[in-house]
Image (tube, rainbow, N blue to C red):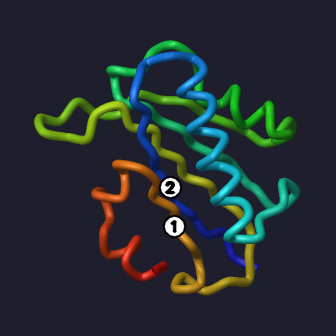
Amino acid sequence: MKVRGVRGATTVQENTEQEILKATRELLEEMLKLNEIKEDNITSIFLSMTSDLDQVFPAVAARRIGLTDTPLLCTQELEIEGALERCIRVLIHYNTTKTLTEINHIYLREAENLRPDIVDRRK
């Protein structure tokens, strides 16, 4: 097995705790499901949000879906002019036998615009 990374991103319409947790949960569940990831194989998860989101740590959503023993780290994205707003990003490091091309990176909602090449490949 190798440690691989799977990326994902999503957006929210409003800066509310409910919206942030719902979108983060949706993203994490999709990433775990489509990559067949079990918590025991996860090394760590990095979660970030743009500076316009500040109502809750996105890691709360991870804990609520049962990732209770996984090391989590929340951080703020760099503020780059023209960058996608109200965006939540996730990077899961996990042990797998999958090759790089077999990993399903997940981009939902407006975040599909970040990596149209990956989104198009999955359709």
In the image, residue 16 lies at what x, y percent? 50, 16
Query: Count of labels shown?
Result: 2
**Residue at (86, 40) in percent of width and height:** 66
Instruction: Please tell me whether residue 49 is drawn above or below residue 116 in the rendered image.
Output: above
**Residue at (66, 69) in percent of width and height:** 3
Q: Amino acid at mark 1?
A: His
In the picture, the quarter occupied by the N terminus is: bottom right
**Residue 101 as seen in the image, left or right of residue 21:** left
| Residue bearing the label numbered 1 | 105
Residue 31 — which label?
Answer: none
**Residue at (46, 44) in percent of width and height:** 89
| Residue bearing the label numbered 2 | 8
**Residue 70 as seen in the image, left or right of residue 17:** right
In the image, residue 88 lies at what x, y percent? 46, 38
CA distance separating discs 1 and 2: 6 Å
Instruction: Please tell me whether residue 37 is drawn above or below residue 73 in the rendered image.
Output: below
- The quadrant holding residue 120 is bottom left
Secondary structure of the residue carrying tag 2 is strand
- Mark 2 is surrounded, within 10 Å at the Cα level, by few (under 14), some (14 to 19) or many (20 or more) other residues, namely many
Q: Which residue is nearer to you in this view: 57 or 10?
A: 10
In the image, residue 93 lies at what x, y percent? 64, 58
Residue positioned most to the left: 81
